[in-house]
DNA sequence: AGCACGCCGACT
DNA sequence: GTCGGCGTGCTC
């Protein structure tokens, strides 16, 4: 009899001991079913060894899935590392590495995903008034049923704390019964191939970069591939992967967002006919995700393309990890396990002794500094592979009357593109019609009742909406402060720019691409196709359009109102703005006609624009690095942020004060004062945080060992808190 | 996280 | 008395 230590999906730091009857083979990494508290759960055996609990409390494992392949050692090791480094319980990380379909006990459904519905008798009820007025919980639950007909358990639990008892009584009354979960929505239709640029020979620089990676196969070598937009980074990936596939190994390719996956899958398909590619991201239906995961795990898939969660995918013959657009902030998870998939990718490459290839036109300063220090090998693609770089110009908006946020120069250039039958893109960093509704008399701006934020005007739906908490209300007709009825939208969002372009260019076909217009599943893919088929003349869009897409007929990119980032309090704001401008500017001129980029700004003399115009990222990054060094900011300091939120501000500050008090002083770790978050209230919750940093990553980690333990001891009733190691957003 | 247990104030 | 809100403690 062995003791198996099992990872379970409970937010507790420890593993749980179970008796394992007989050893058919090495059980580590095996999926198991175990009894836990009053339920039955899926677990994964992470290690075996002597019991750490009183033996009489140890229960036997109910079932071991011997026939299934186990989670491989490197995935478990990566999970362990992530647990230690990001201070997050191991159990949920390990279970989270499994696709959803493998996390549930078959047959006896866990509490999650259990469905209930009204019985015929229940459907006959007209209102909740059959219940006494004081039976608040039962009334709440019943009204949910009367409204929806059926409900899953978790939705009910969100209604009231005593949902369990309430449901039991509704079942006893014969109004509600157990039900089958509703059928899943049908799979999205397969996407038709977009037009692709034809395969071409590599440039000398591409060949050299690809050659370096190829020669490093079989060793842990991190590379930073810095290539200006349009320099053909993807061709370098292809070339390296080509060599890799010849040896029968698998490649893992990470992309920052779901929208970029289909495009890359297609390009792989076009470049390597017959290649077995698996795509893995959270947008997949559960069955698809399971199949893709199994294809990766069995070794059947030769290339796995996925978003950050794919970094935990089992790959028996992993030979190379590519992280495309490595600077992208989406690689950092913003809740739960707050990991950086890019950093974990490098760690995984190290564990598996394979190269990691991080690519970007605007590398993160973290990676750039690693390259300069020689820990990452720098590969450079300085020139565009096929087309000339776009001409970048600033449009000085000072003293100019803008037409709905757009300058004369921008309008003229758009007009010229229309006449030539080319496409233009207007980049606006805000959704909605206008970011605020203001009073002309007193300056009041409609606030969100639950957040420290202004409500955004959405003219289409005739609503004011909060972009932080989702609150919406009707458009106010009078000022809440002075009663004045002269309220006007202030500032410009995508909808407003769209409508002014429609007005100005009557015959042009204008398409808006933002989170609101692409809410529907597969909407983005449809729009992409329309753009490629030249059914659109002017595009208006947010970040969504900036990343990695190839639109050959697009020759003009105009950037509106990004000035706020120039003087932002966030020390990463300029780094981000540079990346954004480069990214969006890179959309221009990817076909035969050279592109042009116009940046509207009131600060045309700002050095950032100068660097963007000269395509001089290394120069700009070096200057930023010097500033960071002088100010002792990352990458010259390693940070951890303690985040806390509660209903009352005093609760937050009491907790953070106690946390600051519990920090061991000295040791080369700086502990800053607790401060309110940049947006202090979101959805009725007050938020604050406390920053700690050190010039040594090891020292910071040692500090966190004791501090994290001390934090667990603080009375944190009514407070939700979390540690964010290497935070990106504050 | 779930889930049970137990305390206590409010109303048929 | 019951019901139901809420705090506390436990899970190998």
Image (spheres, coloured by chain):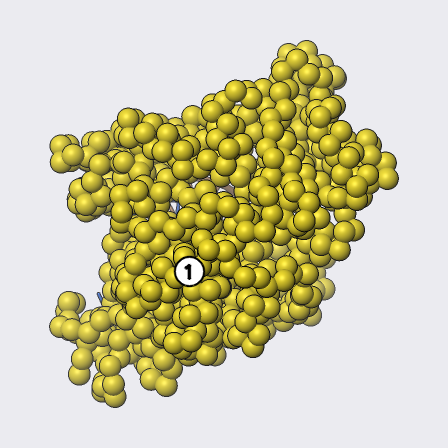
Chain colours: A yellow, B brown, C blue
Residue A255 in the figure: left or right of residue A141:
left
Q: Quadrant of residue A656?
A: top left
Query: Quick check: can you spot residue A395?
Result: yes
| Residue at image coords 60%, 29% | A393
Q: Position of residue A183 (x, y in %)?
A: 63, 71
Give the structural element (helix, strand or loop) at label 1: helix
Q: Position of residue A108 (x, y in %)?
A: 46, 76
Q: Quadrant of residue A314?
A: bottom left
**Which subunit holds the residue at mark 1?**
A
Q: Nearer the viewer, residue A119 or A200?
A: A200
| Residue at image coords 45%, 42% | A362
Q: Nearer the viewer, residue A353 or A22?
A: A353
Q: Position of residue A76 (x, y in %)?
A: 29, 67
Q: Is residue A238 above or below residue A455?
A: below
Residue A652 in the figure: left or right of residue A712:
right
Q: Position of residue A191 (x, y in %)?
A: 67, 65
Q: Which residue is mark 1?
A: A210
Q: Is residue B7 above or below residue A116?
A: above
Q: Quadrant of the C terminus of chain A?
A: top left
Q: Is residue A656 above or below residue A726?
A: above
Q: Nearer the viewer, residue A611 or A671?
A: A611
Query: Quick check: can you spot residue A312?
Result: no
Q: Residues within 10 Å of mark 1 (few under 14, many from 20)?
A: many
Q: Nearer the viewer, residue A21 or A71?
A: A71
| Residue at image coords 58%, 19% | A602
Q: Quadrant of the N terminus of chain A?
A: bottom left
């Amino acid at each position: 009899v062995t003791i198996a230590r099992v990872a379970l999906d409970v937010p507790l730091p420890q593993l749980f001991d179970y008796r394992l009857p007989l050893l058919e083979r090495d059980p580590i990494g095996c999926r198991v079913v175990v009894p836990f508290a009053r339920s039955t759960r899926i677990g994964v055996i992470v290690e075996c060894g002597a019991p750490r609990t009183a033996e009489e409390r140890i229960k036997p494992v109910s079932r071991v899935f011997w026939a299934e392949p186990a989670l491989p050692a490197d995935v478990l090791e990566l999970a362990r590392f992530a647990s230690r480094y990001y201070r997050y319980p191991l159990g949920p990380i390990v279970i989270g590495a499994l696709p959803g379909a493998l996390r549930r006990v078959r047959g006896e459904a866990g509490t999650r995903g259990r469905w209930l519905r009204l019985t015929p008798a229940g459907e006959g009820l007209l209102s909740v008034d059959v219940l006494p007025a004081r039976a608040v919980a039962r009334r709440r639950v019943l009204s949910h049923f009367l409204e929806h007909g059926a409900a899953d358990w978790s939705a009910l639990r969100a209604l009231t704390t005593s949902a369990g008892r309430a449901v039991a009584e509704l079942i006893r009354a014969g109004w509600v019964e157990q039900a089958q979960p509703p059928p899943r929505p049908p799979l999205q239709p397969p996407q038709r191939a977009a037009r692709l640029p034809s395969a071409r020979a590599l440039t000398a620089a591409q060949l050299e970069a690809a050659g370096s990676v190829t020669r490093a196969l079989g060793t842990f070598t991190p590379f930073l591939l810095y290539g200006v937009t349009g320099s053909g980074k993807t061709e370098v990936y292809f070339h390296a992967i080509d060599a890799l596939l010849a040896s029968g190994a698998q490649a893992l390719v990470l992309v920052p967002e779901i929208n970029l996956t289909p495009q890359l899958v297609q390009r792989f398909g076009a470049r390597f006919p017959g290649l077995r590619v698996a795509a893995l991201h959270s947008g997949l239906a559960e069955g698809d995700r399971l199949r893709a995961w199994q294809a990766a795990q069995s070794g059947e898939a030769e290339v796995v393309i996925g978003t950050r969660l794919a970094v935990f995918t089992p790959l028996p013959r992993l030979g190379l990890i590519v992280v495309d657009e490595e600077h992208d902030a989406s690689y950092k998870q913003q809740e739960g396990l707050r990991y950086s998939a890019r950093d974990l990718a490098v760690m995984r490459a190290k564990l598996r002794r394979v190269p990691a290839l991080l690519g970007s036109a605007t590398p993160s300063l973290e990676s750039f500094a690693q390259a300069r220090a020689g820990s990452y090998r720098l590969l450079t693609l300085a020139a565009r592979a096929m087309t000339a770089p776009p001409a970048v110009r600033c449009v000085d908006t000072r003293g100019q009357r803008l037409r709905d946020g757009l300058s004369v120069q921008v309008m003229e250039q758009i007009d010229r593109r229309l006449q030539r039958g080319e496409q233009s893109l207007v980049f606006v960093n805000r959704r909605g019609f206008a970011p605020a509704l203001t009073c002309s008399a007193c300056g009041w701006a409609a606030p969100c009742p639950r957040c420290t934020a202004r409500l955004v005007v959405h003219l289409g739906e005739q609503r004011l909406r909060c972009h932080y908490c989702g609150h919406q209300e009707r458009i106010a007709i009078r000022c809440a402060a002075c009663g004045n009825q002269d309220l006007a939208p202030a500032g410009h969002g995508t909808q407003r720019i769209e409508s002014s372009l429609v007005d100005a260019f009557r015959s042009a076909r204008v398409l808006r691409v933002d989170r609101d217009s692409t809410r529907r599943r597969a909407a983005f893919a449809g729009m992409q196709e329309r753009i490629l088929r030249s059914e659109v003349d002017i595009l208006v869009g947010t970040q969504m359009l900036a990343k990695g897409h190839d639109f050959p007929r697009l020759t003009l990119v105009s950037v509106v109102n990004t000035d706020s980032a120039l003087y932002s309090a966030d020390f990463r704001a300029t780094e981000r703005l540079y990346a954004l401008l480069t990214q969006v500017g890179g959309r221009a001129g990817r076909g035969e006609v050279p592109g042009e980029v116009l940046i509207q700004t009131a600060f045309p003399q700002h050095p950032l624009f100068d660097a963007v115009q000269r395509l001089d990222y290394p120069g700009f990054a070096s200057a930023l690095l010097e500033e960071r060094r002088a100010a002792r900011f990352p990458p010259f300091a390693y940070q951890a942020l303690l985040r806390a939120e509660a209903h009352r501000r005093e609760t937050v500050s009491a907790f953070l004060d106690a946390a600051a008090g519990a920090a061991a002083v000295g040791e080369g770790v700086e502990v800053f004062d607790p401060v309110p978050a940049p947006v202090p209230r979101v959805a009725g919750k007050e938020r604050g945080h406390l920053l700690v940093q050190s010039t040594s990553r090891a020292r910071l980690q040692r500090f966190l060992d004791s501090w994290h333990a001390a934090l667990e001891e603080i009375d944190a009733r009514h407070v939700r808190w979390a540690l964010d190691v290497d935070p990106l957003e504050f």
